[in-house]
Image: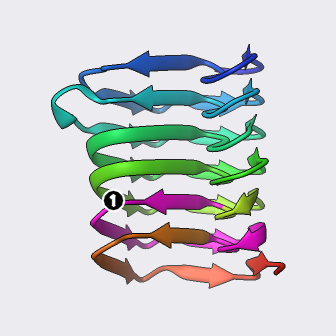
Amino acid sequence: FAQNKAGKDGGTLTGHTVKGLKNVKCYFDGNIAGGDGGVLLLDSIKDHRSIMYSSCIFKNNKAFSGAVQFVSNAKTILFQNCSFRHNVANQFGGCIYLVSAENMLLNNCSYLNNVANQGGCLYILNVPILTAYNCLYINNSAKDKGGAIFIDTCRAISIILSIFKNNHAYT
């Protein structure tokens, strides 16, 4: 998926009331949305199903919020063995902007040189459980808050065997 554009949301795909999503070994490069979700916007996931990405590469994607993905109302969001590089959001989540999910799992992912106003990599809102295992967060930045990650309303955060290096929030 390369060089796709949307004037509003979802540079490659916009889905409302979707029953889950699975992406394996996908490549997303240079996708742009004028609104949310440079690659993908998913809103109101039907029956609170899960979204899973495995062995995917996301680079050079842009959006107002969630340069890679904007998701609301999901059960589980899983990113496994994924790479996020040089993604830019004008407002929230240089890579991912997630609103209302039961939990988010990040396993063996790398986040390099991503930028946003808040949450250089991730902007997480109303997600009770966040688990990051064996992830790298390097050279990400936010103009306001959360050089790598910005979280608002999370009950349990587990960050295990992960590395945060040279991430910056400038205010």
65 lies above or below 135: above
Q: Which residues are the magenta region? A: 121-148
Q: Position of residue 155 (x, y in %)?
A: 28, 76
Work out whether residue 46 or residue 51 is closer to the camera in this orientation and state it: 46
39 lies above or below 87: above
Task: Name the quarter where the N terminus is drawn.
Answer: top right
Q: Residue at 51% across / 18% down in the picture?
A: 14
Q: Is residue 61 toward the left or the right of residue 10 in the image?
A: right
Q: Position of residue 23 (x, y in %)?
A: 40, 30
Q: Position of residue 161 (x, y in %)?
A: 42, 83
Q: Which residue matches tag 1?
A: 105
Q: Position of residue 49 (x, y in %)?
A: 20, 34
Q: Is residue 139 visible in this depiction of the protein?
A: no
Total marks in image: 1
119 lies above or below 62: below
Quarter of the image for residue 119 reads bottom right
Q: Is residue 11 visible in this depiction of the protein?
A: yes
Work out whether residue 102 or residue 107 is closer to the camera in this orientation and state it: 102
- Badge 1 marks a residue whose secondary structure is strand
Q: Is residue 85 toward the left or the right of residue 50 in the image?
A: right
Q: Residue 132 magenta-drawn?
A: yes
Q: Residue at 82% across / 81% down in the picture?
A: 171
Amino acid under disc 1: Leu
How crowded pointer 1 is (Cα within 10 Å; few <14, some 14-19, many 20+) is rated as some
Q: Is residue 135 toward the left or the right of residue 46 in the image?
A: right
